[in-house]
Image: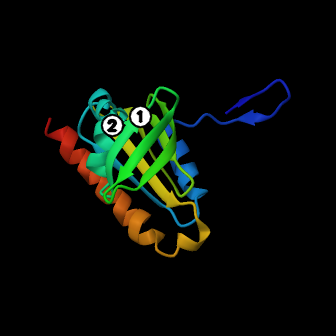
Amino acid sequence: MTGTPAGWPVADLDPVRRMRVLASALPGGGFAQARIAAPFDRVWGYLADLDRSVPELIGFIRRFELRADGTALATGLVGNRGRFDVDLRDGWCVMQDRFVVGGFAAVSDGEATLLAACGAVRTRGVRRIAPLVFGDRTVRSTLAKVRHRVELS
């Protein structure tokens, strides 16, 4: 921690730690973290290609189209559509629409990558089924898919 001119402490968190903080603030959400035996550039290169990675990793999204304005159009398995706001930076991606929020964060860990992910339902009434869709187990499964895709490439 360092101090600001006003004397307030400042904590700098890497993207994975920030993702953990975000997940802890999301009611009914899931969080997972894994060490992927692949370099950061390969892991993040795959994840940052949202048009490809999101449909491969998220079972209920058939198509994800990132736009230049920082939004994306997601198409579900039955043709339903949603517009997502996307914050995509090196090692950090958070995607949210009016119903769900989720994201990935990554940092280099030597020759491997430390990867975290979270997801949660934003709609209060739907949160009862949220653990089925966005619980820790589901998020761990998503990280396992990432591992499979990038460790074999």
Quadrant holding the N terminus = top right
Q: Is residue 76 left or right of residue 4?
A: left
Q: Residue at x 37, y 58 (%)?
A: 139
Query: Observer-nearest residue: 36 or 136?
Result: 136
Image: 96 above or below 109: below
| Label disc, if present, on residue 10 of the rendered structure | none
Q: On the image, numbered disc 2 is attached to which residue?
A: 51
Image: 33 above or below 44: below
Q: Earlier in the sequence, mark 2 or mark 1?
A: 2
Kind of element beneath mark 2: helix
Quarter location, residue 13: top right
Pinpoint residue 130: horizontal percent, then vertical percent: 47, 69
| Residue at the extreme front of the image, as rendered | 79
Pinpoint residue 59: horizontal percent, then vertical percent: 30, 57
Pinpoint residue 56: horizontal percent, then vertical percent: 26, 47
The way the protein has been coloured in the rendering is rainbow
Tell me whether the residue at label 2 lies in contact with that at label 1, contact meaning CB atoms closer than 8 angstroms.
Answer: yes
Pinpoint residue 148: horizontal percent, then vertical percent: 19, 47
Q: Residue at x 31, y 54 (%)?
A: 142
Image: 92 above or below 24: above
Quarter location, residue 60: bottom left
Q: On the image, numbered disc 1 is attached to which residue?
A: 66
Q: Amino acid at mark 2?
A: Asp
Q: Amino acid at mark 1?
A: Leu
